[in-house]
Amino acid sequence: MYQNSDFHLPLDPAAGLREQKRMATRSRIAAAAAELATADGLENTGADQIAAAAEVGRATFFRYFSSKEHAVAEGMNARWLNRIVAALDHQPADYAAAEAVVAAFAELAHDFDDISGQIRELATMERSSPALRAWGLGVYAHYEGVIAGLISPRIRDLRQPDPRPRLIGALAMSSVRIALDDWLAHGGSLPDRVQQALRSITVVDTGVLRESGSRTSRPRVRPRD
């Protein structure tokens, strides 16, 4: 049985017991898929192996996932969400929201070189399948929401509805997605590309929006002749 507690998908506390059990089963299958693919490679990982590791039947596996690629992608992304949450959680309390996000992702970027093969395989796999690509965009949106919730307490004068937490989360995930696209297309250092893209997030603090809530000068509109 797969028992690595580092891999998990968040359970909705508002869901009923049956739904929580269903979500736990899905999480266990995805976790097993990610672990097997990490250890043996995607090509050497099959649906039957994943089902056996998660202690479910083949039919149960395909009730939750359409393919082994889908299960692996979900498991891998759950791992990264856990890492993002942990990295953000231990940033110094005096860091502003955008500063904490940039620092957290910079820490994660240091690990990219060690697992660049896995990242390339997963990113290529998601980009080669329209269904997985659409699903991946949904995962990115979920990440944005999680990041927004974690950094909201760091924003002074936060008033609901306030776009800044979600905006910073969206900028962070867009930076990672753009860095991955550039790395797959042009090579180079993935950590360097991620950190370069992350610098765009500082516009939230120093450009049009400020965490202090102060207004900045708006661009002048040229009058029509």
Image: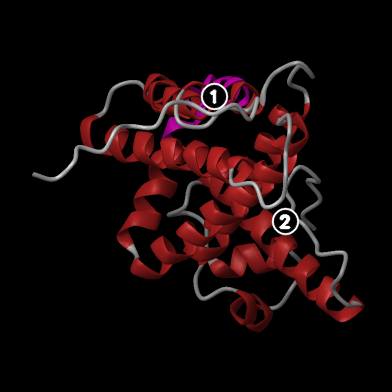
User: Label 2 sits on what residue type?
Assistant: Leu
Give the color scheme: rainbow, by chain, secondary structure or one colour. Answer: secondary structure
Per the image, the residue denoted by label 1 is 205
- Residue 162's label in the rendered image is none
Query: Residue 223, image x and y in percent?
Result: 18, 41
Query: Residue 69, image x and y in percent?
Result: 48, 62
- Residue at point 39% right, 27% down? 197
Per the image, the residue denoted by label 2 is 9
Q: Which range of residues does the magenta coloring cover?
A: 102-117
Question: Disc 2 and disc 1: Cα gap in Å?
Answer: 31 Å
User: Label 1 sits on what residue type?
Assistant: Asp
Figure check: 44 above or below 88: below
Figure check: 208 above or below 38: above
Q: Nearer the viewer, residue 46 or 186?
A: 186
- Residue at point 64% right, 83% down? 59
- Residue at point 51% right, 44% down? 170
- Residue at point 70% right, 35% down? 151
